[in-house]
Image (cartoon, rainbow, N blue to C red):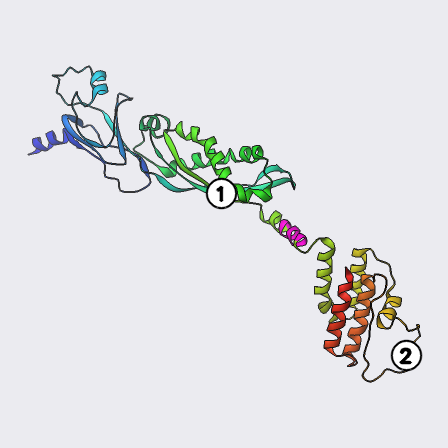
């Protein structure tokens, strides 16, 4: 029995690989000190290829199918071994299986922002990421260039090299395109096609085919994106002047809650618009354009109504804010209602154009 076990262990008559994961790309059949029986069965399943290596050299490559290993089915190895057609002894070779299934949803991205020259913003830093898919097409080349004599080689071992190969060409693509950053989102498909053209020859040099390549996103670093968002907001409001008017209107109710808040706000807005310092006179004109200035009114009517007319000339922001401050004080004293104040505020703010 021991002799029979010894004999059985010395010769291999069935060679096959049942893949047990989706990461392994190359797998060496366990030969140890065994020899392959002449006429042995080789099974190569769909999505696989097999390579026989004899004395360190690639001898024969087999695609999907079932083979009886003879001098007829192994022409190159037969030539290397100097067999004639009657020679039928066991032989010693290494057998490697390769998975030709697509490796899907492989991710690439820029680990750090890439600096490029932009038509609109000058020098900007960009990030980009996406996905790609590939598979082995030339197991002979993949064996010689990548996997070698390793017992097992996985896609994880290759990811870093492929990702860095892609990222290394991104700056070239962005620079050559001359497309402003604002328009890049509308050209992601074109960028993907151009970048694929760049890296396909490099994949082919490893025995790989690049099946698909997509650019999913092109963006700025967070701090630059925040600045761009603010600029977009200003443009959406109709320019800097309209944006400042909007901010002033938004800030008035908050400033009015603090003593001296409206005065400080008026000073800031006045500087922003570059207007004169005519607060007191404009206030009197806004309340009653026909009235002559007096030190103080003799008496305040219990329920006054204001018929404020628009000044003939443009009123400064400081004037209007000061007027609103006075009117707000009258609301606090119960002289003006909140509705009357809101109506007057809307009318005065409309004159900030």
- Left/right of residue 171 with respect to residue 132 in the rendered view: right
Q: Report if residue 292 lies within the magenta region.
A: no
Q: Position of residue 339 (x, y in %)?
A: 72, 76
Q: Nearer the viewer, residue 65 or 51?
A: 65
Stretch in magenta: 227-235
Q: For residue 257, what is the image quadrant?
A: bottom right
Front label number (2 vs 1): 2
Identify the residue under disc 1: 129
Q: Assign the N terminus to one quadrant of the image.
A: top left
**How many numbered badges does the structure rendering display?**
2
For the C terminus, the image quarter is bottom right
Report if residue 290 is visible in the image.
yes
Q: Residue at x 82, y 63 (%)?
A: 318
Residue 207 lies in what quarter of the image? top left
Tag 1 secondary structure: strand
Distance, label 2 to label 1, CA atoms, is: 71 Å
Q: Which residue is depicted at the point 86% across and 61% down?
A: 313
Left or right, 16 with reference to 200: left
Q: Is 105 displayed left or right of 6 in the figure?
A: right
* Tag of residue 297: 2
> Callout 1: few (<14), some (14-19), or many (20+) C-alpha neighbours within 10 Å?
some
Q: Position of residue 61 (x, y in %)?
A: 26, 26
User: Majority secondary structure of the magenta segment?
Assistant: helix
The numbered dot on residue 95 is none
């Amino acid at each position: 029995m021991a002799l029979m076990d010894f004999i059985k262990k010395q010769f291999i008559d069935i060679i096959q690989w049942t893949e047990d994961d989706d990461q392994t790309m190359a797998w060496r059949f366990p030969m140890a000190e065994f020899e392959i029986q002449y006429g042995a069965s080789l099974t190569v399943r769909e999505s696989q290829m097999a390579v026989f290596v004899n004395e360190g050299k690639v001898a024969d490559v087999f695609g999907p199918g079932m083979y009886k290993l003879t001098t007829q089915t192994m022409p190159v190895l037969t030539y290397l071994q100097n067999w004639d057609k009657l020679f039928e002894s066991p032989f010693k070779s290494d057998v490697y299986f390769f998975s030709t299934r697509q490796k899907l949803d492989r991710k690439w991205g820029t680990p750090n922002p890439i600096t490029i020259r932009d038509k609109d913003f000058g020098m900007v830093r960009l990030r980009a990421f996406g996905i790609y898919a590939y598979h082995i097409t030339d197991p002979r080349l993949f064996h010689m260039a990548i996997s070698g004599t390793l017992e097992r080689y996985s896609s994880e071992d290759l990811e870093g090299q492929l990702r860095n190969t892609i990222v290394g060409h991104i700056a070239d693509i962005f620079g050559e395109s001359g497309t402003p950053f604002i328009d890049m989102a509308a050209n992601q498909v074109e960028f993907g096609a151009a970048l694929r053209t760049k890296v396909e020859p490099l994949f082919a040099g490893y025995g790989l085919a690049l099946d698909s390549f997509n650019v999913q996103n092109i963006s700025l670093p967070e701090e630059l994106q925040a600045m761009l968002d603010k600029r977009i907001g200003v443009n959406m409001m109709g320019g800097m002047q309209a944006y400042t008017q909007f901010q002033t209107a938004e800030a008035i109710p908050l400033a009015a809650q603090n003593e001296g808040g409206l005065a400080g706000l008026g000073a800031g807005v006045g500087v922003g618009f570059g207007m004169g310092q005519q607060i007191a006179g404009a206030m009197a004109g806004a309340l009653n354009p026909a009235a002559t200035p007096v030190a103080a009114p003799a008496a305040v009517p219990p329920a006054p109504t204001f018929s404020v007319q628009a000044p003939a000339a443009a009123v400064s922001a400081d004037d209007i804010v000061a007027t609103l401050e006075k009117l707000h004080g009258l609301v606090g004293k119960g002289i003006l209602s909140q509705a009357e104040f809101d109506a007057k505020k809307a009318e005065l703010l409309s004159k900030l154009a």
